[in-house]
C-alpha cells in the first residue's frame, strides 16, 4: 500500500485489508513521508502490519518497488491508500487462483465511489486482449487485480519514471513477459474519486496522456501514428457499443462526483 498525505482515507484502506477473512495476509505500507496525520493512522495498526516505513520517495511507483522488495507472498496485489477492498475479496482471489492454476494475473471488478466512500457506478475489468490494450480499449481494475510473484519477478518492477500510469505499464510488462490473464465475475474493490487523487487531478491530465502513450508504444514497439489514434477511436466505440449503459453510468458518476465528464 503506497501512501502520501491520505490521512482522510488511509485508515479505511488499512481496515479493509486487515479485516479480510483470509488467514494469511501480509500487508506492507510504504508512506512517502506524509505530514497530514497519515503516519499516526498507520502506526495505530502497526501490530497488524508485516512492515511499514515512512520516508521520502520518488513517487508511488518507487514506493511500490520498495514494498514489493519486502513482500514474501506467492500472490501479490497493491491497494492505493484512498481505495478499499470489499469484504471477502482476498478469499475469492485465492480460490480463483487455485481454480485457475494456469493463470498468472487474475482480475475481478470494482465500483467507483465518491470522496466519502459512497459507492456508485460499477467499474468493470475487460477480458484481457493485448491488441485492444494497445489501443486504449482494454482496462483492468487495478485494486481488483492480483498476480503471481514468479511472473512479477520476470519484469523490472514498476517504472518510477512513469508518474501517473504505473499500473497500466505493469500490465503491459507482465503481458510482454508471457503472463496469462484471467477475469472472473466478482466485485472485489472500490476506487475512490476525489479531486486530490493522481488519477483525477486536472493539472496531471497532460502527464497521464503522455505516460499512457509511452506504455502503448512499448506494447506496439514503435511510435504511435495518426492512424493509430484513429483506430483507437474505432476500438473504443466498439467497446462502448457492447456496453453503452455501463459506460454512460460511469460518465454520469464522474460528472456528479468530479463535476466534469471524463478523467
Image (cartoon, rainbow, N blue to C red):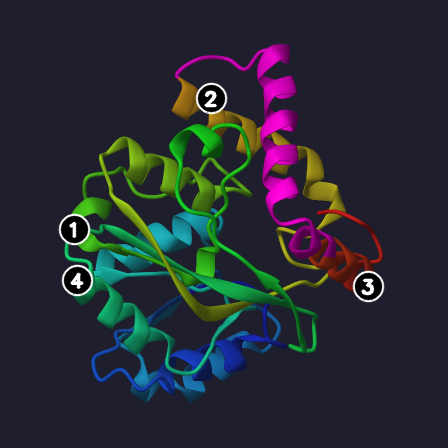
Judge whether residue 167 is colored magenta. no
Quick one: label 4 or label 3, which is nearer the N terminus? Answer: 4
Residue displayed at 60% across by 44% down? 242
Residue displayed at 81% across by 57% down? 255
- Left or right of residue 29, residue 214 in this image: right
State the image coordinates of residue 17 (x, y, percent, origin top left): 39, 78
Judge whether residue 237 is colored magenta. yes
Quick one: label 4 or label 1, which is nearer the N terminus? Answer: 4
Residue behind mark 2: 217
Is residue 73 visible in the rendered image? The answer is no
Q: Which mark is residue 74?
A: 4
Give the CA separation, mark 1 to mark 3. Answer: 41 Å
Give the CA separation, mark 4 to mark 2. Answer: 30 Å
- Left or right of residue 244, residue 99 in this image: left
Quick one: label 4 or label 2, which is nearer the N terminus? Answer: 4
Cβ atoms at labels 4 and 3 below 8 Å apart: no
State the image coordinates of residue 44 (x, y, percent, origin top left): 44, 88
Closer to the camera: disc 2 or disc 3? 3
State the image coordinates of residue 226 (x, y, percent, origin top left): 64, 12
Secondary structure of the residue carrying numbered label 3: helix
Quarter of the figure with the N terminus: bottom left
Give the CA separation, mark 2 to mark 1. Answer: 28 Å
Q: Which mark is residue 102?
A: 1
When the figure is inspected, residue 243 is found, relative to residue 188, above or below; the finding is above
Amino acid at each position: 500500500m503506497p501512501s502520501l498525505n491520505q490521512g482522510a482515507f488511509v485508515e479505511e484502506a488499512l481496515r479493509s485489508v486487515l479485516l479480510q477473512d483470509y488467514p494469511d495476509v501480509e500487508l506492507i505500507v510504504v508512506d512517502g513521508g506524509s505530514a497530514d496525520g497519515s503516519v499516526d493512522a498507520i502506526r495505530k495498526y502497526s501490530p497488524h502490519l508485516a512492515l511499514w516505513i515512512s520516508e521520502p520517495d520518488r513517487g508511488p511507483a518507487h514506493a511500490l518497488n520498495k514494498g514489493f522488495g519486502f513482500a514474501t507472498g506467492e500472490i501479490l496485489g497493491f491497494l492505493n491508500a484512498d481505495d478499499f477492498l470489499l469484504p471477502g475479496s482476498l478469499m475469492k482471489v485465492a480460490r480463483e487462483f487455485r481454480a485457475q492454476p494456469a493463470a498468472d494475473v487474475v482480475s475481478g471488478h470494482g465500483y467507483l465511489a465518491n470522496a466519502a466512500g459512497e459507492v456508485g457506478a460499477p467499474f468493470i475489468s475487460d477480458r484481457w486482449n493485448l491488441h485492444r490494450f494497445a489501443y486504449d480499449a482494454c482496462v483492468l481494475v487495478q485494486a481488483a487485480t492480483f498476480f503471481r510473484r514468479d511472473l512479477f519477478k520476470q519484469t523490472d518492477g514498476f517504472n518510477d519514471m512513469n508518474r501517473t500510469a504505473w499500473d497500466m505499464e505493469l500490465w503491459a510488462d507482465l503481458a510482454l513477459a508471457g503472463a496469462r490473464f484471467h477475469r472472473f465475475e466478482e466485485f472485489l474493490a472500490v476506487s475512490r474519486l476525489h479531486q486530490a487523487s493522481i488519477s483525477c487531478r486536472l493539472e496531471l491530465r497532460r502527464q497521464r496522456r503522455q505516460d499512457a502513450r509511452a506504455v502503448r508504444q512499448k506494447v506496439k514497439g514503435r511510435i504511435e501514428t495518426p492512424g493509430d489514434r484513429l483506430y483507437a477511436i474505432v476500438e473504443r466505440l466498439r467497446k462502448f457499443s457492447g456496453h453503452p449503459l455501463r459506460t454512460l453510468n460511469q460518465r454520469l458518476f464522474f460528472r456528479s462526483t468530479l463535476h466534469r465528464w471524463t478523467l
